Image (cartoon, rainbow, N blue to C red):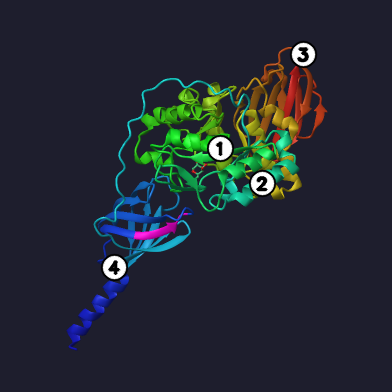
């Protein structure tokens, strides 16, 4: 080889290995997960690269995400949303393939052929609006357990039965936690008549419901108004009444209906009509089924949630087991307070108590804030193996009484800052005050009767976490509150 030829070969090799000059523009296809119902989920990417900038879309069986990001050498990171902290998908380009990482999954995309793209789904026009009759349920905030926060896709019949047993033996059921709710990933496929079955993890949903009922508990299930759920399983789109009847025939008592895949078809303006459709279907199902709307607080749901027959509706995005997430969710719920009441509740998402990433003080605050705000109490931990501290938090009857108070008022903060103070009026004329120490060190909280609107003074007061009566002196009561902890008193007024 001549000297110049060797040089050109070296340059070529360097370009090929550095990725310089490689471009991701084009359509790509990759096998992704096999769902628990046997369906192969694929990732279809349509990308355009200009310089180091990349735009495009990522399509799974149930979702279409916009993408935007950059190429650094051969490595690219693509985000769907400017607020995202981690990429929707990341990867390397090498040898005409994309080596992709999404969450914890690694897979390879190759150039797509015509016909590899997902077919577009026809839009079914949402119905005209009308008010759905109240189903008479959830006079106080619903209580129970849900599989998602801890188990996500790793939920099956045996685990649900074990959880039902533990709900009884731990005293959860007798404290009011009666709903045992299966979240996403139970779904099978539709048969030739369009009937939706469960997948191999749930061999017989009716038998499971019978078992749960035999324990004095109720069974909840999950679906979506879209063609697909958040985890890409079949949703109820175009099968609303059929699915409601299937759920009723199985003996289902509670439906969480999660927007996710509906985004492929509808805009936020359609939320009310789309949720109304399932509200009507549940009433026609032949069984009382509590109706939980899961739309992340979008579309001003609090203004119409009850009109579509909703017994609760999400006011926030998904909670995670951290102090920051828990506090952010409850604070986001504040403006919705006027819309909570018997039969229809604001839902700041399920409990993380006992899942291990907050301190017991933080979990006590979590429980207190959910009770003060009359929020649904759906435990999200492993009820089969609770620590004594977790049990004491979830089973504190004095705190549960605050949540379940028949007046159904959602507390609002009366003071913000380092000591955030929430006040909730109760049916018997007393009030509950919760003071949360938002700071990093222990602080003394001082509660004044005048802050509670008790002008005639305090007749009696009780610390509902310490389970002791306490005394107001000269119209006030002081106590130490640990960092991220709470002081919660039930105070009755002099007449
Ligand atoms: C959404 C919901 C969660 C959970 C998952 C299941 O993220 O907000 O509560 O139901 O979907 O896929």
Asked if the residue at tag 2 contacts the one at tag 4, i.e. Cβ–Cβ closer than 8 Å, the answer is: no
Q: Nearer the viewer, residue 308 or 239?
A: 239
Q: Spatial distance from mark 1 to mark 3, Cα to Cα?
A: 36 Å
Q: Is residue 461 magenta?
A: no
Closer to the observer: label 1 or label 2? 2
- Give the CA separation, mark 1 to mark 2: 20 Å
Task: Give the mark nearest the N terminus, 4 or 3.
Answer: 4
For the residues labelled 4 and 2, the Cα–Cα distance comes to: 49 Å
* Residue displayed at 43% across by 41% down: 260
Depth-wise, is mark 4 or mark 2 nearer the camera?
Answer: 2
In the image, is residue 150 above or below residue 424?
below
The residue shown at (54%, 28%) is 311
Q: Quarter of the image for the N terminus: give it.
A: bottom left
Q: Residues within 10 Å of mark 4 (few under 14, many from 20)?
A: few
What is the C-alpha distance between the residues marked 4 and 1?
44 Å
- Between discs 4 and 2, the one toward the N terminus: 4
| Main SS class of the magenta portion in the image | strand
Residue 105 in the image: state x and y as whole percent.
Answer: 45, 60
Foreground: 346 or 366? 346
Tell me the residue that label 1 is attached to: 349
In the current view of this chain or complex, which residue is farthest to the bottom? Answer: 1
Q: Position of residue 112 (x, y in %)?
A: 28, 60
Q: Height in image: 370 above or below 461?
A: below
Report the span colored magenta: 30-35
Q: Which residue is mark 2?
A: 163
Residue 370 located left or right of residue 286: right
Q: Secondary structure at mark 1?
A: loop
Q: Residue beneath label 4, please?
A: 96
Is the residue at mark 4 in contact range of ligand 1, meaning its CB lies under 8 Å from it?
A: no
**Foreground residue, 36 or 409?**
36
């Amino acid at each position: 080889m001549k000297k110049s030829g060797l040089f050109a070969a070296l340059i070529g090799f360097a370009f090929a290995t550095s990725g310089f000059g490689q471009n991701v523009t084009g359509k790509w296809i990759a096998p992704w997960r096999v769902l628990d119902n046997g369906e192969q989920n694929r990732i279809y990417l349509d990308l355009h690269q200009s310089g180091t900038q990349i735009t495009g879309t990522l399509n799974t069986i149930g979702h279409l995400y916009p993408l935007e990001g950059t190429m650094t050498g051969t490595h690219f990171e693509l985000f769907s949303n400017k607020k995202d902290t981690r990429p929707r998908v990341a990867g390397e380009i090498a040898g005409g393939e994309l080596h992709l990482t999404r969450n914890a999954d690694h897979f390879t995309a190759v150039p797509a052929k015509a016909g590899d793209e997902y077919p577009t789904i026809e839009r079914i026009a949402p119905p005209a609006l009308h008010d759905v009759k109240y189903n008479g349920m959830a006079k106080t905030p619903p209580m129970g357990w849900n599989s998602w926060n801890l188990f996500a896709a790793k939920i099956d019949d045996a685990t649900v039965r074990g959880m039902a047993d533990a709900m009884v033996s731990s005293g959860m059921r007798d404290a009011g936690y009666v709903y045992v709710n299966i979240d996403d990933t139970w779904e099978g496929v539709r048969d030739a008549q369009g009937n939706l079955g469960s997948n191999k993890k749930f061999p017989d949903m009716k038998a499971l419901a019978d078992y749960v009922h035999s324990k004095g508990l109720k069974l909840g299930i999950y679906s979506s108004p879209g063609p697909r759920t958040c985890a890409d399983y079949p949703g109820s789109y175009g099968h609303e009444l059929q699915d409601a009847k299937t759920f009723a025939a199985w003996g289902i008592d509670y439906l969480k209906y999660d927007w996710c895949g509906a985004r492929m078809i509808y805009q936020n303006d359609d939320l009310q009509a789309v949720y109304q459709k399932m509200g009507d279907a549940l009433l026609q199902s032949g069984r009382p089924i509590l109706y939980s709307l899961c739309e992340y607080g979008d579309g001003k749901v609090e203004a119409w949630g009850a009109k579509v027959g909703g017994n609760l509706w999400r006011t926030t995005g998904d909670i995670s087991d951290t102090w920051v997430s828990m506090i952010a969710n409850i604070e986001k719920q504040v403006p919705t307070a006027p819309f909570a009441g018997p039969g229809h509740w604001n839902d700041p998402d399920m409990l993380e108590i006992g899942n291990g990433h907050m301190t017991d003080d933080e979990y006590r605050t979590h429980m207190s804030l959910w009770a003060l705000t009359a929020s649904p109490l759906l435990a999200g931990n492993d009820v089969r193996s609770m620590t004594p501290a977790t049990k004491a938090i979830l089973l504190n009857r004095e705190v549960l009484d605050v949540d379940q108070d028949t007046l159904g008022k959602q507390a609002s903060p009366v003071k913000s800052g380092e000591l955030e103070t929430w006040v909730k009026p109760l049916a018997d004329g007393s009030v509950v005050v919760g003071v949360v120490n938002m700071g990093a060190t222990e602080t003394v909280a001082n509660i004044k009767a005048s802050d509670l609107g008790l002008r005639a003074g305090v007749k009696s007061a009780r610390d509902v976490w310490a389970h002791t009566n306490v005394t107001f002196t000269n119209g006030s009561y002081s106590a130490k509150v640990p960092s991220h902890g709470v002081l919660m008193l039930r105070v009755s007024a002099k007449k």
